[in-house]
Image (cartoon, grey):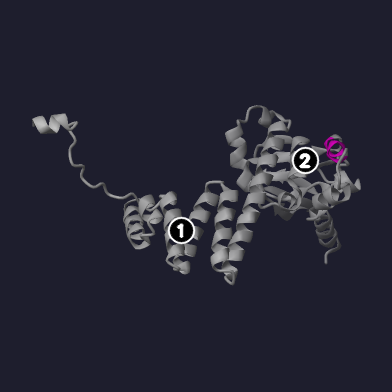
Amino acid sequence: MAINWFRGGKRQQEPQEHTIDDLIILERYDEAGERLRARLKSNPSDLHSHLKLAEVYTQLKQFEKAVDEYVYAAEEYAQDGFHDKGLALLAKAMKLAPMDHALRMKAEKLQRGKSMEQTRTLALEGLQQAGGALQAGTTALELKRLWPNLEGSAVVRKLPGESLKRLFGATELLRLDTGAPIAREGSPEAFLLLIVQGTIEVSVNAGGRATPVRSFSAGDVIGEGTLLERVPWAADYRTVEPAIVLKLTRAGLESCLAGNSDPRGFLDTLREQHNDRDVAATVRRLRSGS
Protein backbone atom coordinates (compact mmCIF):
# COMPACT_ATOMS: atom_id res chain seq x y z
CA MET A 1 0.00 0.00 0.00
CA ALA A 2 2.77 2.45 1.00
CA ILE A 3 4.88 1.61 -2.02
CA ASN A 4 1.86 2.16 -4.25
CA TRP A 5 1.25 5.52 -2.59
CA PHE A 6 4.83 6.72 -3.04
CA ARG A 7 4.78 5.64 -6.67
CA GLY A 8 1.79 7.86 -7.31
CA GLY A 9 -0.86 5.24 -6.74
CA LYS A 10 -0.62 3.95 -10.30
CA ARG A 11 -2.74 0.97 -11.15
CA GLN A 12 -2.33 -1.30 -14.10
CA GLN A 13 -4.91 -0.21 -16.73
CA GLU A 14 -7.01 -2.83 -18.41
CA PRO A 15 -6.80 -2.81 -22.23
CA GLN A 16 -9.70 -0.91 -23.81
CA GLU A 17 -11.68 -2.28 -26.75
CA HIS A 18 -10.97 -0.56 -30.04
CA THR A 19 -13.74 1.50 -31.59
CA ILE A 20 -14.90 0.84 -35.15
CA ASP A 21 -13.00 3.91 -36.30
CA ASP A 22 -9.87 2.58 -34.57
CA LEU A 23 -10.23 -0.73 -36.38
CA ILE A 24 -10.54 1.07 -39.72
CA ILE A 25 -7.44 3.18 -39.00
CA LEU A 26 -5.60 0.00 -38.05
CA GLU A 27 -6.82 -1.55 -41.33
CA ARG A 28 -8.55 -4.34 -39.46
CA TYR A 29 -11.42 -4.17 -41.94
CA ASP A 30 -12.86 -7.64 -41.33
CA GLU A 31 -13.35 -6.88 -37.64
CA ALA A 32 -14.78 -3.43 -38.41
CA GLY A 33 -17.22 -4.97 -40.90
CA GLU A 34 -18.33 -7.57 -38.38
CA ARG A 35 -18.97 -4.90 -35.75
CA LEU A 36 -20.87 -2.70 -38.23
CA ARG A 37 -23.08 -5.57 -39.41
CA ALA A 38 -23.92 -6.39 -35.79
CA ARG A 39 -24.82 -2.76 -35.16
CA LEU A 40 -27.05 -2.63 -38.25
CA LYS A 41 -28.79 -5.82 -37.25
CA SER A 42 -30.15 -4.04 -34.18
CA ASN A 43 -30.58 -0.67 -35.92
CA PRO A 44 -31.08 -1.13 -39.70
CA SER A 45 -31.82 2.56 -40.32
CA ASP A 46 -28.45 3.79 -38.99
CA LEU A 47 -27.24 5.53 -42.15
CA HIS A 48 -23.89 6.47 -40.61
CA SER A 49 -23.13 2.77 -40.08
CA HIS A 50 -24.25 1.92 -43.61
CA LEU A 51 -21.77 4.46 -44.97
CA LYS A 52 -18.97 3.18 -42.73
CA LEU A 53 -19.71 -0.33 -43.94
CA ALA A 54 -19.56 0.88 -47.55
CA GLU A 55 -16.06 2.25 -46.84
CA VAL A 56 -15.03 -1.05 -45.27
CA TYR A 57 -16.34 -3.07 -48.21
CA THR A 58 -14.47 -0.75 -50.57
CA GLN A 59 -11.21 -1.39 -48.73
CA LEU A 60 -11.89 -5.13 -48.86
CA LYS A 61 -12.46 -4.84 -52.64
CA GLN A 62 -16.03 -6.09 -52.16
CA PHE A 63 -17.35 -3.43 -54.51
CA GLU A 64 -20.78 -4.93 -55.13
CA LYS A 65 -21.57 -4.89 -51.42
CA ALA A 66 -20.20 -1.35 -51.11
CA VAL A 67 -22.45 -0.20 -53.95
CA ASP A 68 -25.49 -1.73 -52.22
CA GLU A 69 -24.71 0.22 -49.05
CA TYR A 70 -24.22 3.49 -50.92
CA VAL A 71 -27.45 3.04 -52.88
CA TYR A 72 -29.46 2.27 -49.75
CA ALA A 73 -28.15 5.36 -47.98
CA ALA A 74 -28.63 7.55 -51.07
CA GLU A 75 -32.27 6.56 -51.42
CA GLU A 76 -32.95 7.11 -47.72
CA TYR A 77 -31.38 10.57 -47.80
CA ALA A 78 -33.36 11.48 -50.93
CA GLN A 79 -36.59 10.31 -49.33
CA ASP A 80 -35.93 12.72 -46.47
CA GLY A 81 -35.37 15.56 -48.95
CA PHE A 82 -31.55 15.57 -48.94
CA HIS A 83 -31.20 15.11 -52.70
CA ASP A 84 -27.69 16.53 -52.98
CA LYS A 85 -26.40 14.10 -50.34
CA GLY A 86 -28.09 11.25 -52.17
CA LEU A 87 -26.58 12.27 -55.50
CA ALA A 88 -23.11 12.49 -53.94
CA LEU A 89 -23.43 8.95 -52.59
CA LEU A 90 -24.64 7.62 -55.93
CA ALA A 91 -21.60 9.26 -57.54
CA LYS A 92 -19.39 7.22 -55.20
CA ALA A 93 -21.29 4.07 -56.14
CA MET A 94 -20.87 4.81 -59.86
CA LYS A 95 -17.11 5.15 -59.43
CA LEU A 96 -17.07 1.61 -58.05
CA ALA A 97 -19.37 0.26 -60.77
CA PRO A 98 -18.99 2.55 -63.81
CA MET A 99 -20.69 0.10 -66.18
CA ASP A 100 -23.83 -0.29 -64.05
CA HIS A 101 -26.56 1.46 -66.05
CA ALA A 102 -29.09 0.95 -63.24
CA LEU A 103 -27.04 3.31 -61.06
CA ARG A 104 -27.12 5.98 -63.74
CA MET A 105 -30.90 5.61 -63.99
CA LYS A 106 -31.22 5.94 -60.21
CA ALA A 107 -29.14 9.13 -60.32
CA GLU A 108 -31.32 10.57 -63.09
CA LYS A 109 -34.47 9.71 -61.14
CA LEU A 110 -33.05 11.36 -58.03
CA GLN A 111 -32.11 14.45 -60.05
CA ARG A 112 -35.69 14.67 -61.33
CA GLY A 113 -36.89 14.36 -57.75
CA LYS A 114 -34.61 17.22 -56.74
CA SER A 115 -35.93 19.38 -59.59
CA MET A 116 -39.53 18.55 -58.67
CA GLU A 117 -38.85 19.43 -55.04
CA GLN A 118 -37.55 22.83 -56.13
CA THR A 119 -40.62 23.26 -58.33
CA ARG A 120 -42.86 22.27 -55.42
CA THR A 121 -41.25 24.86 -53.16
CA LEU A 122 -41.74 27.66 -55.70
CA ALA A 123 -45.27 26.52 -56.54
CA LEU A 124 -46.28 26.57 -52.87
CA GLU A 125 -44.83 30.05 -52.54
CA GLY A 126 -47.06 31.05 -55.44
CA LEU A 127 -50.12 29.42 -53.85
CA GLN A 128 -49.46 31.36 -50.66
CA GLN A 129 -49.60 34.56 -52.71
CA ALA A 130 -52.80 33.58 -54.54
CA GLY A 131 -55.98 35.54 -53.94
CA GLY A 132 -59.47 34.25 -53.24
CA ALA A 133 -61.57 33.64 -50.15
CA LEU A 134 -60.33 30.06 -49.78
CA GLN A 135 -56.69 31.07 -49.78
CA ALA A 136 -57.30 33.69 -47.11
CA GLY A 137 -58.38 31.01 -44.63
CA THR A 138 -56.00 28.27 -45.72
CA THR A 139 -52.87 27.39 -43.76
CA ALA A 140 -49.53 26.57 -45.33
CA LEU A 141 -50.00 22.93 -44.30
CA GLU A 142 -53.37 22.76 -46.07
CA LEU A 143 -51.82 24.23 -49.21
CA LYS A 144 -49.12 21.54 -49.11
CA ARG A 145 -51.85 18.91 -49.02
CA LEU A 146 -53.17 20.20 -52.33
CA TRP A 147 -49.82 19.62 -54.05
CA PRO A 148 -50.29 15.88 -54.85
CA ASN A 149 -53.38 16.85 -56.88
CA LEU A 150 -51.33 19.32 -58.93
CA GLU A 151 -47.96 17.64 -59.48
CA GLY A 152 -49.27 15.34 -62.21
CA SER A 153 -50.68 18.23 -64.23
CA ALA A 154 -49.05 19.01 -67.57
CA VAL A 155 -48.87 22.65 -66.48
CA VAL A 156 -46.80 21.74 -63.41
CA ARG A 157 -44.59 19.30 -65.30
CA LYS A 158 -43.85 21.68 -68.18
CA LEU A 159 -43.48 25.10 -66.57
CA PRO A 160 -40.22 26.10 -64.82
CA GLY A 161 -40.56 26.68 -61.10
CA GLU A 162 -40.37 30.47 -61.34
CA SER A 163 -43.09 30.56 -64.04
CA LEU A 164 -45.27 28.28 -61.92
CA LYS A 165 -44.81 30.53 -58.91
CA ARG A 166 -45.77 33.52 -61.07
CA LEU A 167 -48.83 31.70 -62.42
CA PHE A 168 -50.14 30.51 -59.06
CA GLY A 169 -49.51 33.89 -57.48
CA ALA A 170 -51.70 35.53 -60.13
CA THR A 171 -54.68 33.21 -59.59
CA GLU A 172 -57.59 32.99 -57.18
CA LEU A 173 -57.91 29.81 -55.12
CA LEU A 174 -61.61 28.99 -54.94
CA ARG A 175 -63.75 26.29 -53.34
CA LEU A 176 -66.92 25.42 -55.25
CA ASP A 177 -69.92 23.51 -53.92
CA THR A 178 -71.59 20.62 -55.71
CA GLY A 179 -73.70 21.88 -58.61
CA ALA A 180 -72.00 25.27 -58.77
CA PRO A 181 -72.24 26.75 -62.28
CA ILE A 182 -68.86 27.47 -63.87
CA ALA A 183 -69.84 28.86 -67.27
CA ARG A 184 -72.83 28.90 -69.64
CA GLU A 185 -72.73 28.09 -73.31
CA GLY A 186 -72.10 31.23 -75.36
CA SER A 187 -70.73 33.22 -72.42
CA PRO A 188 -67.78 35.45 -73.40
CA GLU A 189 -66.50 35.67 -69.79
CA ALA A 190 -62.76 35.18 -70.09
CA PHE A 191 -61.06 33.06 -67.44
CA LEU A 192 -59.12 29.83 -67.16
CA LEU A 193 -59.39 27.20 -64.45
CA LEU A 194 -56.80 24.71 -63.29
CA ILE A 195 -58.69 22.05 -61.36
CA VAL A 196 -57.01 21.16 -58.08
CA GLN A 197 -59.65 18.85 -56.65
CA GLY A 198 -63.09 17.56 -57.61
CA THR A 199 -64.89 17.01 -60.91
CA ILE A 200 -66.42 19.45 -63.38
CA GLU A 201 -68.97 18.12 -65.86
CA VAL A 202 -69.65 19.55 -69.30
CA SER A 203 -73.08 19.26 -70.92
CA VAL A 204 -74.94 20.81 -73.83
CA ASN A 205 -78.56 21.15 -74.89
CA ALA A 206 -78.91 18.80 -77.84
CA GLY A 207 -82.31 17.75 -79.11
CA GLY A 208 -84.09 19.55 -76.29
CA ARG A 209 -82.30 17.78 -73.45
CA ALA A 210 -79.06 18.20 -71.53
CA THR A 211 -76.49 15.81 -72.95
CA PRO A 212 -73.24 15.09 -71.11
CA VAL A 213 -70.17 15.88 -73.20
CA ARG A 214 -67.30 14.95 -70.88
CA SER A 215 -65.88 15.67 -67.43
CA PHE A 216 -62.64 17.11 -66.09
CA SER A 217 -60.75 16.47 -62.86
CA ALA A 218 -57.57 17.34 -60.95
CA GLY A 219 -54.78 18.64 -63.17
CA ASP A 220 -57.04 19.54 -66.11
CA VAL A 221 -57.16 23.05 -67.57
CA ILE A 222 -60.43 24.46 -68.91
CA GLY A 223 -61.27 27.90 -70.25
CA GLU A 224 -58.11 28.37 -72.29
CA GLY A 225 -60.28 29.07 -75.33
CA THR A 226 -62.07 32.01 -73.75
CA LEU A 227 -58.95 33.46 -72.10
CA LEU A 228 -56.35 32.91 -74.80
CA GLU A 229 -58.37 32.65 -78.03
CA ARG A 230 -61.26 34.97 -77.09
CA VAL A 231 -63.93 32.47 -78.14
CA PRO A 232 -67.11 31.95 -76.08
CA TRP A 233 -67.70 28.90 -73.93
CA ALA A 234 -68.90 26.03 -76.12
CA ALA A 235 -71.06 24.30 -73.47
CA ASP A 236 -72.36 24.45 -69.92
CA TYR A 237 -69.87 23.67 -67.14
CA ARG A 238 -70.77 22.84 -63.53
CA THR A 239 -69.32 20.94 -60.58
CA VAL A 240 -70.67 17.48 -59.79
CA GLU A 241 -68.88 17.31 -56.44
CA PRO A 242 -67.12 19.84 -54.19
CA ALA A 243 -64.18 21.26 -56.10
CA ILE A 244 -61.13 23.44 -55.56
CA VAL A 245 -59.84 25.41 -58.54
CA LEU A 246 -57.24 28.01 -59.43
CA LYS A 247 -58.85 30.77 -61.49
CA LEU A 248 -56.80 32.92 -63.85
CA THR A 249 -58.43 36.06 -65.26
CA ARG A 250 -57.21 38.34 -68.03
CA ALA A 251 -55.65 40.68 -65.47
CA GLY A 252 -53.86 37.72 -63.89
CA LEU A 253 -52.62 36.56 -67.29
CA GLU A 254 -51.19 39.98 -68.05
CA SER A 255 -49.39 39.86 -64.71
CA CYS A 256 -47.90 36.46 -65.63
CA LEU A 257 -46.68 37.70 -69.01
CA ALA A 258 -45.13 40.93 -67.76
CA GLY A 259 -41.37 40.34 -67.64
CA ASN A 260 -41.74 36.67 -68.58
CA SER A 261 -38.61 35.45 -70.39
CA ASP A 262 -40.60 32.95 -72.48
CA PRO A 263 -44.15 34.23 -72.96
CA ARG A 264 -44.82 32.00 -75.98
CA GLY A 265 -43.76 28.87 -74.09
CA PHE A 266 -45.91 29.94 -71.13
CA LEU A 267 -49.02 30.37 -73.30
CA ASP A 268 -48.38 27.13 -75.21
CA THR A 269 -48.27 25.23 -71.91
CA LEU A 270 -51.60 26.69 -70.80
CA ARG A 271 -53.31 25.71 -74.05
CA GLU A 272 -51.52 22.39 -74.48
CA GLN A 273 -54.42 20.16 -73.42
CA HIS A 274 -56.80 21.81 -75.95
CA ASN A 275 -59.75 20.84 -73.77
CA ASP A 276 -61.98 23.72 -74.91
CA ARG A 277 -61.31 22.89 -78.55
CA ASP A 278 -62.13 19.22 -77.97
CA VAL A 279 -65.38 20.13 -76.19
CA ALA A 280 -66.40 22.42 -79.07
CA ALA A 281 -65.69 19.65 -81.61
CA THR A 282 -67.78 17.16 -79.61
CA VAL A 283 -70.66 19.62 -79.35
CA ARG A 284 -70.64 20.13 -83.13
CA ARG A 285 -70.78 16.37 -83.70
CA LEU A 286 -73.66 15.96 -81.25
CA ARG A 287 -75.70 18.67 -82.90
CA SER A 288 -74.99 17.46 -86.40
CA GLY A 289 -76.08 13.96 -85.44
CA SER A 290 -72.77 12.41 -86.54
Residue found 44% across the figure and 66% down from its top:
65
Q: Is residue 244 visible?
A: no
Label 2: few (<14), some (14–19) or many (≥20) C-alpha neighbours in 10 Å: many
Q: Judging from the image, what secondary structure is the residue with disc 2 in?
A: helix
Note whether 44 is above or below 98 in the view shown: above
Quadrant of the drawing holding the N terminus: top left
Indicate which disc residue 55 carries: 1
Measured as percent of width and height from the top left, residue 211 is found at: 75, 54
Can you name the residue that lies furthest to the right here? Answer: 230
147 shown above or below 206: above
Q: Which residues are magenta?
A: 252-257
- Sequence-first tag of 2 and 1: 1
Q: Along the line of sight, which residue is nearer the eye, 109 or 5?
A: 5
* Residue 167's disc number: 2
The front one of 128 and 40 is 40
User: Looking at the rendering, in which quadrant would you find the C terminus?
Assistant: bottom right
Q: Judging from the image, what secondary structure is the residue with disc 1 in?
A: helix
Single out the mark in the foreground, 2 or 1: 1
- Verify whether residue 104 appears in magenta: no
Mark 2 and mark 1: Cα distance apart in space: 47 Å
Q: Amino acid at mark 1?
A: Glu
Along the line of sight, which residue is nearer the eye, 74 or 205?
Answer: 74
- Asked if residue 56 is positioned above or below residue 84 in the image, the reply reads below
The location of residue 156, given as percent across then percent down, is: 71, 49
Q: Amino acid at mark 2?
A: Leu
